[in-house]
C-alpha cells in the first residue's frame, strides 16, 4: 500500500481515513464480489487499481476469501492501532516488509 500513499495525500480526508476507505472498497470486491465499484474521483480509481494490481500480483495464490480475511485483519489493525496517524502501517510493515515490486519484499 505504500505505493498508493502519494495518491492519497492530495485528498481532503486524512491518509488514515483514505486507507480505511480503500480497505472497505477492497472488501467490497473480494468479500462481497462487487464488480461495479463507484469512485469519487479518477485519482481514487487509479490508486485503487494500483493496490488491486499489487494484490493480484503478490497474492495470486490466495482465494478471494483469504484476501478478504487479510483485508479485514488490516482494517481491524488500522482501527485499533492508530490515534489518527499511520502507526499501524509500521505495525504491518514489521510482519510483511516493504513492497519493492511484484513478489519482492524487504524486511525491516
Image (tube, grey):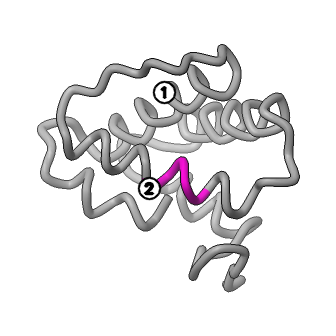
Q: Which residue is mark 1?
A: 25
Q: Residues within 10 Å of mark 1 (few under 14, many from 20)?
A: some
Q: Secondary structure at mark 2?
A: helix
* 39 versus 42 height, above or below: above
The C terminus: image quadrant: bottom right
Picture residue at 75% right of the left edge, 39% below the top: 67
- The percent position of residue 1, horizontal first and vertical second, equals 50, 58
- The percent position of residue 34, horizontal first and vertical second, equals 56, 16
Q: Please state the extent of the stretch shown in magenta in the rendering.
A: 50-54
**Magenta stretch: helix, strand or loop mostly:** helix
Residue 102 lies in the magenta stretch: no
Picture residue at 70% right of the left edge, 21% below the top: 31
Residue 93's image quarter? bottom right
Q: Which residue is mark 2?
A: 50
Residue 83's image quarter? top left
- The percent position of residue 64, horizontal first and vertical second, equals 78, 33
Of 60 and 2, the residue lying toward us: 60
Q: Viewed as shown, does residue 40 lie left or right of 96?
A: left
Amino acid at each position: 500500500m505504500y505505493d498508493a500513499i502519494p495518491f492519497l495525500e492530495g485528498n481532503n480526508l486524512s491518509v488514515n481515513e483514505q486507507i480505511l476507505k480503500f480497505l472497505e472498497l477492497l472488501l467490497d470486491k473480494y468479500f462481497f464480489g462487487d464488480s461495479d465499484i463507484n469512485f469519487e474521483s479518477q485519482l481514487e480509481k487509479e490508486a485503487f487499481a494500483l493496490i488491486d494490481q499489487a494484490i493480484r500480483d503478490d497474492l495470486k495464490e490466495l482465494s478471494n476469501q483469504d484476501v478478504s480475511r487479510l483485508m479485514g485483519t488490516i482494517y481491524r489493525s488500522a482501527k485499533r492501532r492508530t490515534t489518527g496517524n499511520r502507526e499501524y502501517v509500521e505495525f504491518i510493515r514489521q510482519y510483511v516488509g516493504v513492497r519493492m515490486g511484484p513478489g519482492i519484499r524487504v524486511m525491516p
